Image (spheres, rainbow, N blue to C red):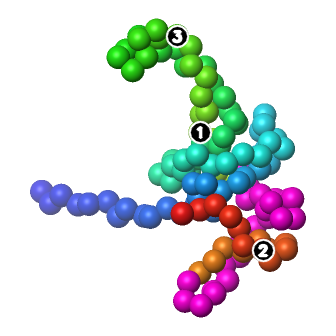
Amino acid sequence: MAVTKKAVKKQRLHVRKGDTVMVITGNYVGKTGKVLSAIPKKDRVVVEKVNMIKRHTKPSKALPQGGIIEREAPIHVSNVMLYCTECKSVTRRSIKIVGDEKVRVCKKCGHNLPGGK
C-alpha cells in the first residue's frame, strides 16, 4: 500500500500578532485589544482582555500555591476586525508598495497600520 501525504494548505489570517483589533460580534462586541497570539490552523486569535476564562490549576513547581488563574481564551478570527488608531474605527487593510517592501495600509484613511512583525 502506498502512503499518501495530505496536501497542507497554508492558511492566512487577516490579522497578525501585535495588531490592534476590535471585536465585532459576540459577548465582547466593541472591545479593542492587542492580538497576543494567532492560531492559523484553527482560525483563532487570542486578544488581550477579551474572552477571559478561569482556569483551575493544580500546584506545580512554577505555581506552588495552585488556585484559580484568569486568562484569555481564543476567539474565532471572523469575530474581529483590524482597528486603525489614526481614524479610530475598524477598517480593512490594503497593501501599498513603498520602495521594495510591502506595507499594510488602512483602507479608510491611508495611514500605515501599526503592529505586525
**Neighbourhood count class around disc 1 (C-alpha, 10 Å): few under 14, some 14–19, many 20 upward:** some
Q: Badge 1 is on which residue?
A: 74
Task: Give how far across and how far down residue 17 sits, in percent.
Answer: 57, 54
Badge count: 3
Q: Is residue 67 left or right of residue 91?
A: left
Secondary structure, mark 2, is loop
Quarter occupied by residue 68: top right
Secondary structure, mark 1, is loop
Task: Give how far across and how far down residue 23 sits, in percent.
Answer: 76, 46
Residues shaded magenta: 80-101
Quarter occupied by residue 73: top right
Question: Residue at point 65% right, 43% down?
Answer: 47
Task: Decide if residue 84 is in sight here.
Answer: yes
Confirm whether the magenta stretch covers residue 9.
no
The amino acid type, in three-letter code, at marker 1 is Pro
Q: Badge 3 is on which residue?
A: 67
The amino acid type, in three-letter code, at marker 3 is Gly
The one nearer the camera, 74 or 69, is 69
Vertical arrangement, residue 58 with respect to residue 80, above or below: above
The amino acid type, in three-letter code, at marker 2 is His
Confirm whether the magenta stretch covers residue 81.
yes
